Amino acid sequence: MNSRVQKQSFQIRDARLTEAEQLPAIEISAAQSFRSLPALTWIATSDAMSADAHRRSVRTGTCWVAVDAMDTPVGFLTASVHHDDVHILEMSVASPWQGYGIGKALLRHLEQWALRKKLTGITLTTFQEVPWNAPFYSKMGFVILSNKALDQRLASVLDREHSHGFPKGSRCAMRFDLRHIAHQK
């Protein structure tokens, strides 16, 4: 790929099992943005979510890809359903494709899917201070959950992230409440 993609069209669709092997490379490409943050450069060389984990989400219908004009994945969102919420396990856009609205499109696609499934929220964990993390999700309507508002599942996710090397307090859980959208329809 060129270092800078011309204004290109993309579309969002369900991921295919045969594409699961391609998704870790997209995550690694996306993670190169962390090289610009001295305290987090190690993320650029960390392991990506496994193809097996993506395959599990493809099988349950909770993995979507953004594809270019050649139907090649350039971004993805992999999630899992927990009770009334869908939790984003990973969302990544290949470095040359960042800044074209793919992340927003993936989130809006997930939102529409979750509404059809009659779920009440979308959750995720992310960095609080990284511009393309919590501030991005806040602009998309997510709110940071206080420690008191965390359920056991989200508290456990944050604890696991801390035990895997994320600095304590650098991560947060966020939630997008779908109930207000469902009432508007």
Image (cartoon, helix red, strand yellow):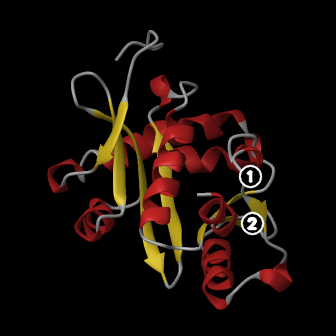
Instruction: Looking at the picture, tell me which residue is in the foreground, 112 or 79.
Output: 112
Q: Measured along the vertical axis of the image, is residue 151 above or below residue 22? A: below
**On-image quarter of the N terminus:** top left
Kind of residue at disc 1: Ala
Do the residues bearing badges 1 and 2 touch, measured as CB atoms within 8 Å?
yes
Q: Position of residue 136 (x, y in %)?
A: 71, 43
Residue that label 2 marks: 172
Relative side of 166 to 145, left or right:
left
Instruction: Looking at the picture, tell me which residue is in the foreground, 139 or 160.
Output: 139
Q: Residues within 10 Å of mark 2 (few under 14, many from 20)?
A: many
Residue that label 1 marks: 134
Kind of residue at disc 2: Cys
Name which residue lies at 63% across and 77% down.
Answer: 163
Name which residue lies at 77% across and 46% down.
Answer: 135
Instruction: Looking at the picture, tell me which residue is in the foreground, 135 or 50.
Output: 135
Mark sitting on residue 95: none
Name which residue lies at 74% across and 52% down.
Answer: 134
Q: Position of residue 58 (x, y in %)?
A: 26, 62
Question: For numbered disc 1, what is the local secondary structure?
Answer: helix
- Toward which corner of the image does residue 31 lie, by quadrant? top right
**Residue farthest bottom in this picture:** 152
Question: For numbered disc 2, what is the local secondary structure?
Answer: strand
